[in-house]
Image (cartoon, grey):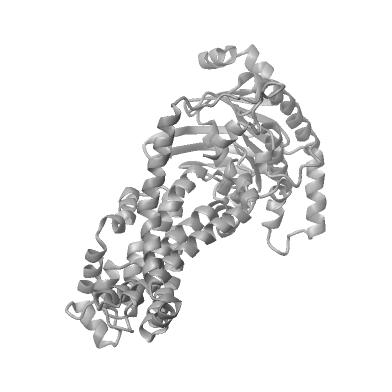
Amino acid sequence: MSELALASGGAGVPRPTRPSRRHKEITTEPRGVRIALIGTVLALISVLLFAPLLAVFGEALRQGWAASVEALASPDACSAIRLTLIVAAIAVPLNAVFGIAAAWSITKFDFPGKTFLVTLIDLPFSVSPVVAGLALVLLFGANSTFGAWLVAHDMKIVFAFPGIVLASMFVTFPFVARELIPVMIEQGSSEEEAALSLGASGWRSFLTVTLPNIRWALLYGVLLSTARAMGEFGAVAVVSGKIRGVTTTMPIMIEILYNEYLSVAAFSLAGVLALLALVTLALKSLLEWRHADLLAATRRH
Amino acid sequence: MHIDIEELAKEFGTERALHPVSLSIPSGALIALLGPSGSGKTTLLRILGGLEFPTSGRVLFDGQDATGLTVQERRAGFVFQHYALFRHMTVFENVAYGLRARKRRERPTEAEIGRRVNRLLDLIQLPDIGGRYPNQLSGGQRQRVALARALAIEPRMLLLDEPFGALDAKVRKELRQGLREIHDRTGITSVFVTHDQEEAMELADLVVVMSMGRIEQAGKPAEIRAKPATAFVRDFIAA
């Protein structure tokens, strides 16, 4: 889009000595068609994106701010918010590290079983989160040999905090790697080779060359997986056992409140969850805007 | 530093990139590896630089076996085909990279790094571009910055992969002269890869003509022109 804007804006484009006021449009479609197309897109965006968001906030504030704040101050809501943030704070950094390692090995090296690994990384995208949750229960639950051993040694995974972290990690696993792989393929490995030939160790070349080159893709992947980790319902619902105030993350607490017809509480919490997601997106835009010059300087070689 | 290549071979899976080849490169020479694509010239260059390792054979630097040396230990100044400048660093930081990567004991002081980088930017006749980013440079400028970056580590040899490949004809001619001058001034043994026979003949002290992973002929440009050893060499230099 930026390229198109540049071309029509004529920043670097040679033009006749005196630019005429009525320069020709590059689009040939009649006005009516353009308006109809733009209108359709805007209508779709409002119905699909804006309206639901507004509805959530509207419902949350139906009985005023005070009721909403009071609902959020309840111990259950507070513990749900805390649990969700802690889970995201553990799952996302771990996944960022795994994602970088996976993308690095896939793009910079050739080894047997590479295609299989790529497919495996995509698995959480295609497997239903509920199935993932059930798999974790089967694997670590008290009915399996391993699970029984864990319980005997006082390590509870299913229906407890570790299970929620595992489930969140499972569903967000592909995000970072998926963002990084195309970027790293496009960049190739000659900059790393140059760093090595200049005497840098592999670790140093990773820190000073690879990481700066992938930082925007990495940031985007991290933000996406943060939003997803906070919002995950299916897998967490199965492994958490929904123990109120103990293993209820925000999405699960919202469901419980909604089922109890506490709609102000449910929607207030939903509003907070939506706000958290919006904040992550705003953070990304802010960073991009702050570093726009550097971004422009480094995107194209 | 003189380089001896003894019966060097390289296979990628079942593919033979290099048949056993032997070559002696005298100290301080400027050598061209000339051949069409797929002739094994880049593979040979990368083996010299330690970016690939041979299936069999040996490489000797000044008579010492260097076959197993890592890429860092070789101290080869490598100029990549598309320069591989670090796009998120300024020209100054690019050139300083090799000095900063040294172990603390051997690392020059910040002031000394600054002096050396500026001296190199003078050498490539681009004294004022230290603060720019690679994407703000022309192709010819990038190539010279890549050369300065490679020279910054005080390399024992200079390895250049198609150093003029991505440039237009006029800039190419100027930079050819520039490389020759820098080579003569520093006296570093230099090997460059090219598919352009005119470039090889004009610039190099010794030309090594390669085809299908074999060395067809190695000699002074005049010798090769006067007495092509094989039909391939005759056809290739006539083209």
Q: How many marks?
A: 0
**Whether residue A118 is situated above or below residue A254 in the rendered picture:** above
Relative to A16, residue B51 above or below: below
At x 19% / y 78%, what residue is drawn?
A145
Q: Quadrant of the C terminus of chain A?
A: top right
**Could you say where residue A178 lies in the image, as x and y percent from the top left?**
40, 52
Residue A102 visible in the picture: no
Q: Nearer the viewer, residue A50 or A247?
A: A50
Give the percent coordinates (x, y) of residue B22: 55, 33
Residue A164 x, y percent position in the rendering: 33, 74
Q: Along the horizontal axis of the image, is A121 left or right of B208?
A: left
Residue in front for this viewpoint, A278 or A298: A278
Residue A228 position in % (x across, y down): 38, 63
For residue A211, side relative to residue A269 (left or right): right
In the foreground, A202 or B65: A202
Q: Quadrant of residue B167?
A: top right
Residue drawn 26% across and 63% down?
A: A129
Q: Is residue B121 visible?
A: yes
* View extreme (front): residue: A63
In percent of the image, x 38 and y 71: which residue is there? Answer: A60
